[in-house]
Image: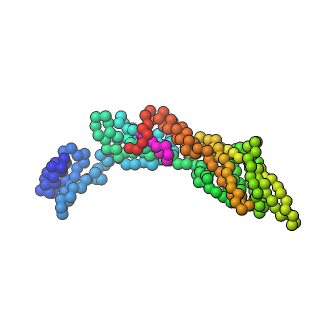
Amino acid sequence: MEHIVSAALEAGAALGKPVSVDGLEDSYAIVPSGYELKSLEHLKLEPSRKKGIVILEDADSFIHYFNLHKAESSQIYAQVNPPSFVGVLNDHGSDYAGWKDHQVKYSCPFTTEWEAWIGSNKKAMKQAEFAEFIERNLLDIVEPTGADMLEISRSLQAKKKVNFVSGIRLSNGQTEFTYEEDIQGTAAKGKLQIPEIFKLGIKVLEGGEAYAVECRLRYRINEAVLVMWYEIVRPHKIIEDAVADVWRVIAEKTEQVILRGRP
C-alpha cells in the first residue's frame, strides 16, 4: 500500500489535480510544500462510510440505534463494574477486517439514590450526622417503616449530648445502647434501641428495576461518644444483578450474543 500512495503522490504532484488511489475509498489532492496527501471526503455530498461514536443515556436508545445500523459483523461488548455496553457496528467479520470506528455506547448511569447510599457506605459518622443522613434519605428505607426510622432519627438527635456507656445486640434484631445523662445534677441512665438491619428499596441503574438493599448497622463507643455507620451487604452482587437485567434485555432485543470485555 505504501508504494501505491507514493506513486499517487508523484502523479498528483505532476498533474496538479485531484487523483484517485486504487484500494482507497476517497479522492485525494496533492498539496504543495512536501506533497502532503489530503482527503477530499469533506467536499462530497455524503461520507464514504458510517463512522463515529454515539453516546446514549438509556438502554432503549442503545437498542434502537444498534438495530438501525447493525450489519452481519456487528458486535456488542459489555462490562459489569463499572457497567457499560459498547456496540461496534463495523466490527471484524469472520473472513474480513472491519474499521471498528462506528460505535454506540451506553454506560448505565447509577441513580442518585444509589450514589448517595454507596457514597456513604462504611463511612463513620457522628451520632447527629448519622441521624441527619437517615432523615434526609428516609424515603429510600422500606424496613423498618419510614415512621419508625424517623422516630429513631429524632431520638438520636435528642440524645446527642448524653454519654454512651455500652451497646449490646438483642435477640430481636435490635441494638440497645445504654447512656447516661445529667438531669438537674443527677446522673440518670437510659436505653435506646436501633435496628441492627434496615432495608432500602431503590433503583440502582437509571431506568432499571428497584432492588431490596440490605444494610447492617455498625457502631463504636469511644470515650462516651457514639459513632455510627452502615455497611451495604454485598453491593457488588447488587450491581451484578442490576446489570444482568439490562444485559438480558439488550441481548434479546438486538438478537446478539454479548461478549464480556472491551472492543
Q: Which residues are magenta?
A: 76-84
Q: Position of residue 113 (x, y in %)?
A: 61, 50
Tell me which residue sits at (64%, 57%) in the image.
Answer: 124
The C terminus sits in image quarter: top left
Tell me which residue sits at (31%, 44%) in the image.
Answer: 99
Q: Position of residue 186 (x, y in %)?
A: 87, 64
| Foreground residue among 119 and 89 | 119
Q: Position of residue 64 (x, y in %)?
A: 46, 40
| Foreground residue among 90 and 136 | 136
Tell me which residue sits at (43%, 34%) in the image.
Answer: 257
Quadrant of the image occupied by residue 22:
top left
Q: How is the image coloured?
A: rainbow
- Residue 200 visible (yes or no): no
Q: How many marks?
A: 0
Q: Which residue is most to the left? A: 14
Quadrant of the image occupied by residue 14:
bottom left
Tell me which residue sits at (59%, 54%) in the image.
Answer: 119
- Residue 185 visible (yes or no): yes
Q: Which residue is most to the bottom? A: 185
Does residue 82 belong to the magenta stretch? Answer: yes
- Compared across the picture, whether 100 is left or right of 145 comes to left
| Foreground residue among 241 and 87 | 241
| Foreground residue among 238 and 177 | 177
- Compared across the picture, whether 63 is left or right of 48 comes to right
Q: Position of residue 178 (x, y in %)?
A: 78, 54
Above or below, comparing residue 191 to residue 182 in the picture: above
